[in-house]
Amino acid sequence: MKGFILVAHGSRREAANQEIADFTASVTQSMAARFELMGHAFWELAEPSLEQAIDLQVAAGATEIKLFPYFLAQGRHVVEDLPSVLNQKREQYPDLKLTLLPHLGAMPGFADWLAEQL
């Protein structure tokens, strides 16, 4: 079973965290054919944490999870923190395939799409 987790930073503002949850729900509709499990996680300041989100999908039967960093730049979270958690979870779940996708700012065509929107 394939899972997808959108990972955002997290905020002290509940409205910002709800915006991520709502966005994930809207993306779920368009990605349902590719992923049986969809979710979101926060790096800090909110829940579910990335660790919790992975554990939930594994408990639901995920054998493969793709993680999408909802970050514009390659800051410490993208370059160090997220890969560190993935390595820990790979040790915890050796049969689980975890893939860290490119962060939002590195997505092919993102700059062109943004220029068209502006």
Image: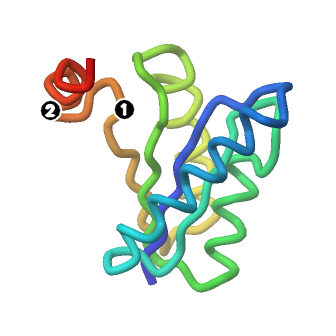
Instruction: Tell me the quarter of the image containing the N terminus.
Output: bottom left
Instruction: Tell me the quarter of the image containing the C terminus.
Output: top left
Q: What's the residue at 14%, 32% (across, down)? A: 109
Q: Could you tell me residue 96's position as x and y percent?
A: 49, 70
Q: What's the residue at 78%, 35% (across, down)? A: 15
Q: Residue flagged by tag 2: what amino acid is it?
A: Gly
Q: Which residue is mark 1?
A: 104
Image mark for residue 39: none
Q: Residues within 10 Å of mark 1 (few under 14, many from 20)?
A: some
Q: Residues within 10 Å of mark 2 (few under 14, many from 20)?
A: few
**Horizontal relation, residue 44 to residue 70: left or right:** right
The residues tagged by marks 2 and 1 sit, at their Cα atoms, a distance apart of 10 Å
Q: Could you tell me residue 30's position as x and y percent?
A: 36, 68
Image mark for residue 109: 2
Q: Is residue 64 above or below residue 4?
A: below
Give the mark nearer the N terminus: 2 vs 1.
1
Q: What's the residue at 69%, 40% (across, down)? A: 42
**Quarter location, residue 59:** bottom right
Along the line of sight, the residue nearer the viewer: 86 or 116: 116
Q: Residue flagged by tag 1: what amino acid is it?
A: Leu
- Numbered disc 1: secondary structure: helix
Q: Could you tell me residue 2's position as x and y percent?
A: 43, 76
> How many numbered discs, if any?
2
